[in-house]
Image (cartoon, rainbow, N blue to C red):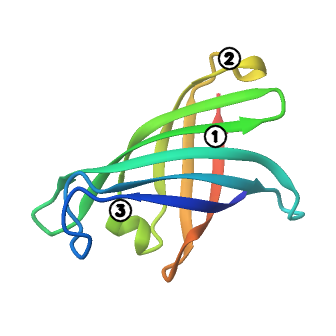
Amino acid sequence: MELNQLSFFIEAGDPRVREIGDGLSYKANLFDSNNNISGTKDITLVFTKELKNGDFIASVVETVHLPGGDIFLQGAINVNDFEALKTQKIDIIGGSGIYEGVKGKEYITQLNSDVFDVASISLAIH
């Protein structure tokens, strides 16, 4: 699946500087391999920690809306690694409808370092 997003930025302070408390919230369309919309995704992330090397860790909460129900995800990503096109993992913590009780991981990789709104995702559900 790929996603395409509409973003809303959250600024904790100076908009020219990335800092703890900054983040974004967005709604994305999910596309299958035939470029058909297969669902939507609501995502909120907030920068919660700055590492000694300058990387930022963000808390992430997501809901994936698919036919038959929703999948809920929660975790943290290294924003700098994500922007460097490195795959990030987020925990699947449950669901509703046919996805009730699911667990697993979401693997998400930004596809272009200059375009934040296009990524490849896969859900490993068990």
State the image quarter where residue 11 is shown: bottom left
Name the residue type under label 2: Glu
- What residue lies at 84% left-to-right and 54% top-to-bottom? 37
Is residue 57 or residue 26 the one in the foreground?
Answer: 26
Task: Label 2, secondary structure: give it.
Answer: loop
- What residue lies at 88% left-to-right and 58% top-to-bottom? 36
Spot occupied by residue 30 in the image (x, y as percentages of width and height):
73, 54
Q: Residue furthest bottom?
A: 114
State the image quarter where residue 120 is shown: bottom right
**Which residue is tagged 2?**
100
- Neighbourhood count class around disc 2 (C-alpha, 10 Å): few under 14, some 14–19, many 20 upward: some
Q: Are marks 3 and 1 in contact (CB under 8 Å)?
A: no
Rounded to the nearest angstrom, the CA distance separating label 3 from label 2 is 29 Å
Q: Which mark is residue 124?
A: 1
Spot occupied by residue 17 in the image (x, y as percentages of width and height):
21, 72
- What residue lies at 19% left-to-right and 68% top-to-bottom? 14
Name the residue type under label 3: Val
Of tags 3 and 1, which is closer to the observer?
Answer: 3
Is residue 124 or residue 75 the one in the foreground?
Answer: 75
Spot occupied by residue 44 in the image (x, y as percentages of width and height):
46, 46
**Which of marks 1 and 3 precedes in the sequence?**
3
- Neighbourhood count class around disc 1 (C-alpha, 10 Å): few under 14, some 14–19, many 20 upward: few
Task: Label 3, secondary structure: give it.
Answer: helix
- What residue lies at 72% left-to-right and 54% top-to-bottom? 29
| Image quadrant where one finds the N terminus | bottom right
**Which residue is tagged 3?**
79
Spot occupied by residue 65 in the image (x, y as percentages of width and height):
71, 37
**Is 41 left, or right, of 112 in this rendering?**
right
Name the residue type under label 1: Ala
